[in-house]
Image (spheres, coloured by chain):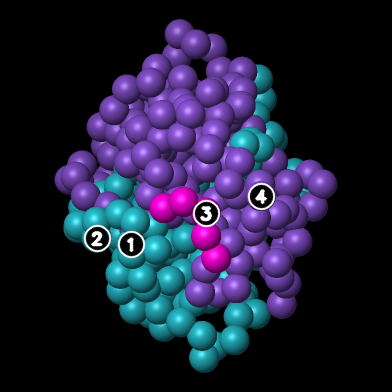
Chain colours: A cyan, B purple
Amino acid sequence: MEQRVSVITLGVADLERAKRFYTALGWRTNTDPSLDVAFFQAGGMVVALWGRGQLAEDSVVEDAPGWGGVTLAHNVRSPEEVDRVIDDARAAGATIGREGAETFWGGYSGVFIDPDGHPWEVAHNPRWTVADDGSVRLGD
Amino acid sequence: MEQRVSVITLGVADLERAKRFYTALGWRTNTDPSLDVAFFQAGGMVVALWGRGQLAEDSVVEDAPGWGGVTLAHNVRSPEEVDRVIDDARAAGATIGREGAETFWGGYSGVFIDPDGHPWEVAHNPRWTVADDGSVRLGD
């Protein structure tokens, strides 16, 4: 198995609400709006939004409420950019888990929670490189 | 907010077990093994393994058992490669959710569940392109 992820699918309760949220954050999809799914090209991978029940069935997991133990992160190039993205998420309707602040690992981050409960850390890690195309490289 | 994901962190109950699983699938990490986290460079992003309780606290979510509504997918270049990755996952100790088979959307896929319950779809989508570097492009 190659060392990569092709798609992250986020299960959502209301596809139109979820599309509005990510669109308000500046994301764009070319998926036919009449379909029951939305695909966002995200660098060399894809983020998809799909009904949570359909995704559970397709993934052969029990659709039991709770937290599955997955957090996404969006790394940016400065602490100021962390604050800006957290503010944009708040304006788009996210719940702010924590405001941007210095972290125990020597960086700066905040957390927002999307309308379906998916947490996103927004982080500046001074030891990692964020390239012009948005790709991230480990420092070690 | 740029349209990209930098890190996917999978919360795990036993970091050594999780590292053994992904290493058995062929993945490699350069993270100092004495640390309580492991980072895998995965194309232009990073997959991290971290203790589930620590991740929940850091993500400001309740560590309630259940399924959070996130499925990862690993897209490959042929149906035969789907079967091969599913077999490799089985050999590494995954639970197989479903074997490779034709899908309702015109592709071919199977699902494995990692030791911490994280589902991965392994998929061949004939309308999407998997480049030599593993990056995936939407067909539309």
In this view, A83 is above or below B117: below
Q: Do pointers 3 and 4 mark residues of a single chain?
A: yes
Q: Tell me where residue B45 appears, x and y as whole percent.
A: 63, 42
- Quadrant of the image occupied by residue B49: top left
* Residue bearing mark 4: B80
Q: Secondary structure at mark 1?
A: helix
What residue is disc 1 on?
A56
Please tell me whether residue B95 belongs to the stretch shown in magenta.
Answer: no
The number of discs equals 4
Secondary structure of the residue carrying numbered label 2: loop
Residue that carries the numbered disc 2 in the rendered image? A63
Between discs 3 and 4, the one toward the N terminus: 4
Q: Are marks 2 and 1 on the same chain?
A: yes
- Compared across the picture, whether A101 is left or right of A73 comes to left
| Percent position of residue A58, x then y | 40, 63
Q: Nearer the viewer, residue B132 or A15?
A: B132
Is label 4 on the same chain as label 2?
no
What residue span does the magenta drawing correspond to? B98-102
